[in-house]
Image (spheres, rainbow, N blue to C red):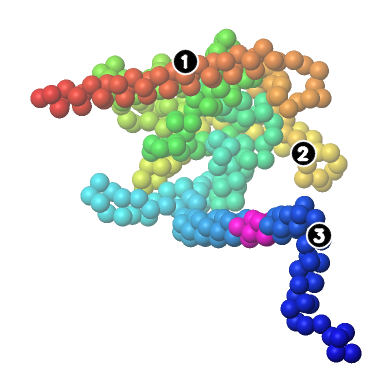
């Protein structure tokens, strides 16, 4: 039995001999697999760590953005704060004041004409009927409103007196109605093509550089428009005919001006409710109808075919193509003007440095 027992050294030698019996390629394959497994685990951990860092920093950025936006979003959108020339901070509450004035000083059946942007505010705060709001999907109706604002005063009055009792405009600079008016003119021209013939972007209706080179001034077409007269009434020699539009209210900081339309056509006003057509009796869905006195203006318009109107057989692609080509040309001109201004600034700076 003692002979059968193997010494420790003999056993170790046998193990070594057994290991040597494995082919070298199998040993290398085992090592390679272990290395690949280790690298795969390491790669997964690095990717996971990178994703965690991305999520963390994205979350922190979003948190900072939320805190930054919380202050302005917590305030009423029609109330803001500004500074006077002497640096005094004041609360600018012109818009709400204007709507309250309409609520308290106009008949309950008064119709307020304003650009559609303010329709909901007038309806909700002033509790008065508006000519258009954010739910006015009828492009031709918005174009008619744009035509009234951007056409010359006498023609605008001849249409407005059949549709509204008061007209409200945002004034006082910034994003007021005069600043928006080139866009209004393009909308008007999309239906009433005789407004800017052959020019879908109405480039003749815009602010141009003043003759003295300082600032901008309205083009002749813009200068003659109703919106220019209502916004700038009493400034720079602009005067509104009080036999057509009488200014009845101006807010403290001049951000809103309200005019009473003189000589409202009572027959047209009476005709609309008497000829209301609803889908069923008592329904709230009652597509509006224009009084007969406005029909001659409407007949001059062309139904606007939008790009997404796939179900219509009409084709207005030439107008759309010309519109985008003109718009692209205007953008190129703006970029070129900016480059020219930068060059002029650099020349002035270099001449100053030479001195």
Around disc 1, counting alpha carbons within 10 Å, would you say few (fewer than 14), some (14 to 19), or many (20 or more)? Answer: some
Judge whether residue 120 can be spotted in this image.
Answer: yes
Whether residue 59 appears in this view of the structure is no
Name which quarter of the figure residue 12 lies in.
Answer: bottom right
Whether 171 is drawn above or below 189: the answer is below
Q: Is residue 40 magenta?
A: yes
Residue 170, x across and y down, in percent? 46, 38
**Foreground pick, 324 / 43:** 43
Image quadrant containing the C terminus? top left
Q: Are dots 3 and 2 in contact, CB under 8 Å?
A: no
Is label 3 or label 2 in front? 3
First in residue order: circle 2 vs circle 1 = 1
Per the image, the residue denoted by label 1 is 204
User: Quarter holding the N terminus?
Assistant: bottom right
Q: Are marks 2 and 1 in contact (CB under 8 Å)?
A: no
Task: Classify residue 284 as left or right of residue 318.
Answer: right
Q: Which residues are magenta?
A: 38-46
Q: Which residue is pictured at 48% across the width and 31% down the height?
A: 180
Label 1 secondary element: loop
Which numbered marker is on residue 286? 2
Q: Report the residue marked by disc 3.
A: 22
Q: Position of residue 17 (x, y in %)?
A: 79, 66
Neighbour tally class for label 3: few under 14, some 14-19, many 20 plus, Cα within 10 Å: few
Give me the C-alpha separation between circle 2 and circle 1: 38 Å
Q: Secondary structure at mark 2?
A: loop
């Amino acid at each position: 039995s003692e002979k059968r027992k193997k010494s420790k050294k003999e056993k170790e030698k046998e193990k070594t001999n057994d290991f040597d019996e494995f082919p070298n390629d199998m040993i290398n394959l085992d090592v390679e697999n272990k290395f690949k497994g280790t690298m795969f685990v390491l790669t997964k951990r690095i990717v996971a760590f990178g994703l965690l860092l991305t999520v963390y920093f994205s979350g922190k950025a979003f948190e900072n953005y939320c805190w930054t936006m919380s202050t302005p979003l917590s305030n009423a959108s029609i109330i803001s704060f500004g500074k006077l020339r002497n640096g005094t901070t004041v609360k600018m509450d012109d818009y709400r004041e204007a709507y309250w004035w309409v609520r308290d000083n106009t008949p309950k059946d008064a119709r307020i004409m304003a650009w559609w942007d303010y329709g909901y505010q007038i309806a909700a705060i002033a509790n008065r009927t508006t000519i258009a709001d954010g739910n006015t999907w009828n492009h031709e109706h918005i174009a008619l409103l744009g035509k009234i604002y951007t056409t010359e005063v006498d023609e605008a009055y001849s249409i407005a007196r059949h549709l509204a009792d008061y007209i409200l405009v945002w004034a006082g600079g910034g994003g007021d109605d005069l600043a928006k008016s080139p866009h209004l003119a393009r909308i008007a021209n999309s239906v009433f093509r005789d407004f800017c013939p052959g020019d879908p972007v109405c480039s003749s209706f815009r602010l141009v550089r003043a003759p003295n080179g300082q600032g901008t001034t309205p083009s002749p077409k813009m200068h003659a428009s109703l919106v220019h007269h209502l916004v700038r009434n009493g400034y720079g020699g602009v005067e509104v005919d009080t036999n057509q539009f009488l200014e009845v209210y101006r807010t403290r900081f001049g951000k809103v001006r309200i005019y009473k339309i003189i000589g409202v056509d009572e027959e047209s006003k009476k005709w609309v409710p008497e000829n209301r057509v609803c889908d069923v009796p008592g329904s709230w869905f009652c597509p509006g109808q224009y009084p007969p006195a406005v029909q001659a203006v409407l007949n001059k318009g062309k139904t606007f075919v939008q790009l997404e109107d796939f179900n219509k057989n009409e084709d207005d692609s030439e107008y759309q193509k010309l519109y985008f080509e003109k718009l692209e040309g205007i953008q190129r001109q703006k970029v070129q003007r900016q480059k020219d201004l930068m060059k002029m600034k650099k020349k002035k700076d270099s001449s100053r440095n030479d001195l």
